[in-house]
Amino acid sequence: MKRNLLALNSTLIVAAMAVHPGLARAQHPADLGCKMQFSLSTWSLIYKQSEGHGLVTCNNGQSMHVKIVARGGGLTVGKSHIDDGTGRFTDVHSISEILGHYGDAEVHAGAGKASEAQVLTKGKVSLALSGTGEGIDLGVDIGEVTLSRAKK
């Protein structure tokens, strides 16, 4: 009797998930597939500061203009800029989750035209950045990158 009741309960649960799959997905919404196009200017002399702007777009049609500010320090010197950079967010379920402070640590060296790739994290959300630009830089630094809603 207990086996039949257990089998019946299991069958009902599987049937309910098949009829209403949205309920199971509602507890774990899908990643929005958000991307960012950005430009960034950086200077450093022990202290490193970067400022720029970007546009985040997600697969669900939402978008947001953002201000990018990075500050850090270490053994670093240089000046550079990135135009037409790209970023890809992972584990974003609401566009507002892209805002906030991301941890940053990097080793860098470049002169003239250069490419850069970097991964930043903020809790479960990650941001992979890549871009090309010009400048000269050398060093090791740690700090944080902050994305905030841009004021128009």
Image: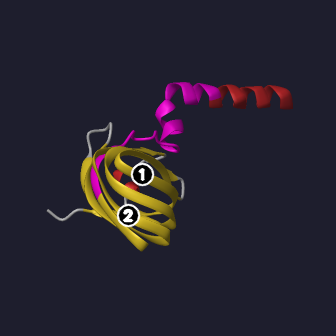
**For mark 1, does the 10 Å Cα neighbourhood hold few (<14), some (14 to 19), or many (20 or more) residues?**
some
- Taking the spot 49% from the left edge, 30% from the top edge, the residue there is 20
Residue kind at label 1, given as amino acid type: Gly
Q: Nearer the viewer, residue 115 or 29?
A: 115
Q: Residue at x 64, y 31 (%)?
A: 13
Say if 10 sits above or below 145 in the image: above
Magenta-drawn stretch contains 109:
no
Which of 139 and 32 lies nearest the eye of the viewer?
A: 139
Label 2, label 1: how many angstroms apart (C-alpha)? Answer: 9 Å
* Left or right relative to 55: residue 13: right
Q: Earlier in the sequence, mark 2 or mark 1?
A: 2
Q: Can you identify the residue that label 1 sits on?
A: 110
Q: Residue furthest left?
A: 152
From what the image shows, is residue 125 above or below residue 60? below
| Quadrant in the rendering for residue 101 | bottom left
Label 1 secondary element: strand
Give the residue number, with chain letter if any, for mark 2. 78
Of residues 13 and 82, the one drawn nearer to the viewer in this rendering: 82
Does the CB distance between marks 2 and 1 fall below 8 Å? Answer: yes
Span colored in magenta: 14-40
